[in-house]
Amino acid sequence: MSPVIPIHAAGCEEQPVLRERGQREVFCGLTGIIWLHRKIQDAFFLVVGSRTCAHLVQSAAGVMIFAEPRFATAIIDERDLAGLADANDELDRVVTRLLERRPEIKLLFLVGSCPSEVIKLDLSRAAERLTARTRTRVLNYSGSGIETTFTQGEDACLAALVPGLPALPEAEPQRLLVVGTLADVVEDQLARLLGQLGIAQVDFFPPRHADQMPAIGPQTRFLLAQPFLADTARVLEARGAQRLPAPFPLGVEGTTAWLQAAAQAFGVAPDLFEKVTQPARERAQAALARHRPALEGRRLFFFPDSQLELPLARFLSRELGMHLLEVGTPYLHRQHLAEELAMLPPGTLVSEGQDLERQLDRCRAARPDLVVCGLGLANPWRPRAWPPSGPLSWCSPPSKATSRPAIWPSSSAVPCVAA
Ligand code: SF4
């Protein structure tokens, strides 16, 4: 097999996108804390929010009561809004007590939310003040449901880190930066693979520890491992780093083309690329072949949730033969997703944003066999009768955000969209 993936512009690159700006049914960006706190092992995420935010993060992360989690919620309530308490003093008191009790915390994120009490607080000034006062690095970003959807919390978190990254001197050789949270096992696998290709100068962002932040500069070439990192890419480019255009590492095709982008930028010989990647490609193709009979020809409808929808749709369509009815995404970054759009079957309906009732009507009329959506939609509907046109499954691929970027699809990756 040739490792070169032809990307034909005949896909959906030029096709109009259905833009909807109505009622949305998506999770907020606080949910990113669930995988971010596992990745950066000496960071702590303090949500400045309401009891609703506390319930969301606590139940989504499912932490046991006796665990020492690396996230918490400082609850700002109506008492503070009424001016009876100074919310800034209260926040300082909570942070000081936390850092005294947990001296291993090296990086503290104040995570903003959407209650009006919180919007009134200037969290960037609070972060500066607390950094000076506590000698722990304190940063802030917003996970508010008004500003962010599900996966955008990660984007906001990483973008907040970029200004503080050390500078990579221009005299240094070119370095590769893989941007986006990857499960440790995937990161190790990828580092090994890149090493075999002769690309040893690799950093991962975010890193596993706060003191391992990568240096950035004009010699940085970065690959996005996730499609929802538009702000992070923008601030990295403002520091001189250059993005390597590629599809996203989902499926055999996407992963091969993604690695190929790095290989081309670092001058890896085509025969070495072929030799190193062939065994993994063959394993992945064999794993996918087992699922193809169950999925081929099935009609698939995506509601917008995570921004992973386009790569996932491209993978399910091209490698498993599924038929795409609609591919909804909360936000479409045309530049970052150009390769994905080009690989979708011509005529695929791509929608951006949401007008929930209209989209539900389209979905009912299309009579899909499989619907991919977030749990916010899936749970209330589970007991309802759906047109009995075939097997119907609900799932939430973003909940796999830490394991999803299985660089080569494994047999365990596919049932998450076909259970
Ligand atoms: Fe908190 Fe707003 Fe998210 Fe609800 S939508 S959990 S109030 S940040």
Image (cartoon, rainbow, N blue to C red):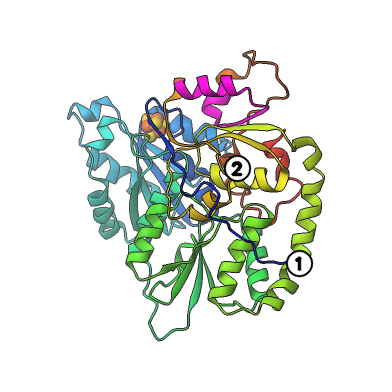
Report the disc number at residue 278. Answer: 1
Kindly identify the amino acid type of the residue bearing the numbered disc 1.
Gln
Asked if residue 215 is positioned above or below residue 151 in the image, the reply reads below
Report the disc number at residue 30. Answer: none
* 312 left or right, relative to 333: right
Asked whether 341 or 282 is in front, the reply is: 341
- Give the class, few, some or many, for how many residues have Cα within 10 Å of label 1's Cα (few <14, many ≥20): some
- The residue positioned 80% from the left and 47% from the top of the image is 289
Q: Main secondary structure of the magenta part?
A: helix
Q: Quadrant of the N terminus?
A: bottom right
Quadrant of res 18: top left
- The residue positioned 40% from the left and 77% from the top of the image is 168
- Which residue position holds label 2? 313
Q: Secondary structure at mark 1?
A: helix
Q: Is residue 375 magenta?
A: yes
Q: Earlier in the sequence, mark 1 or mark 2?
A: 1
Asked whether 16 or 315 is in front, the reply is: 16
Asked whether 162 or 110 is in front, the reply is: 162
- The residue positioned 37% from the left and 26% from the top of the image is 22
